[in-house]
Image (cartoon, rainbow, N blue to C red):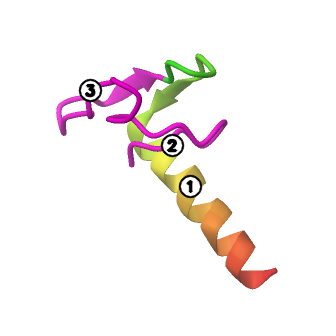
Amino acid sequence: TQACHECGFVMGTAGTEKLTLADREWTCPKCHAHHVRDHNAAQNILTKGIIKLA
């Protein structure tokens, strides 16, 4: 995923480049949170699941 699970910023918007599949770690340009791509994706999936179940 290209969305920061901390602040919701999406890479590829606001003049930033989209992540490539080779980008395994990245830092959010908005909140400066450092992400491991797979962990960030899992956090985003978990958040969506919790919202759906609420």
Q: Tell me the CA gap for discs 1 and 2.
A: 6 Å
Rendering coords of residue 26 (x, y %): 40, 23
- Which amino acid type corresponds to the residue marked 2 in the rendered image? Asn
Badge 3 local density, few (<14 within 10 Å), some, or many (20+)? few
Q: Earlier in the sequence, mark 3 or mark 2?
A: 3
Q: Nearer the viewer, residue 31 or 36?
A: 31
Residue positioned 50% across, 23% down in the render = 28
- Which amino acid type corresponds to the residue marked 1 in the rendered image? Asn
Dividing the picture into quadrants, the one containing residue 7 is top right
Q: Main secondary structure of the magenta part?
A: loop
Q: Say which mark, if any, is on residue 40.
A: 2
Dividing the picture into quadrants, the one containing residue 20 is top left
Q: Tell me the CA gap for discs 3 and 2.
A: 18 Å
Q: Earlier in the sequence, mark 3 or mark 1?
A: 3
Instruction: Tell me the magenta residue range.
Output: 1-27
Residue positioned 58% across, 16% down in the render = 32
Regarding mark 3 in the picture, which secondary structure is present there?
A: loop
Rendering coords of residue 34 (x, y %): 53, 21
- Which amino acid type corresponds to the residue marked 3 in the rendered image? Glu
Count all numbered tags in the image, as a single digit. Answer: 3
Q: Which residue is mark 1?
A: 44
Asked if the stretch drawn in magenta spans residue 3, the answer is yes
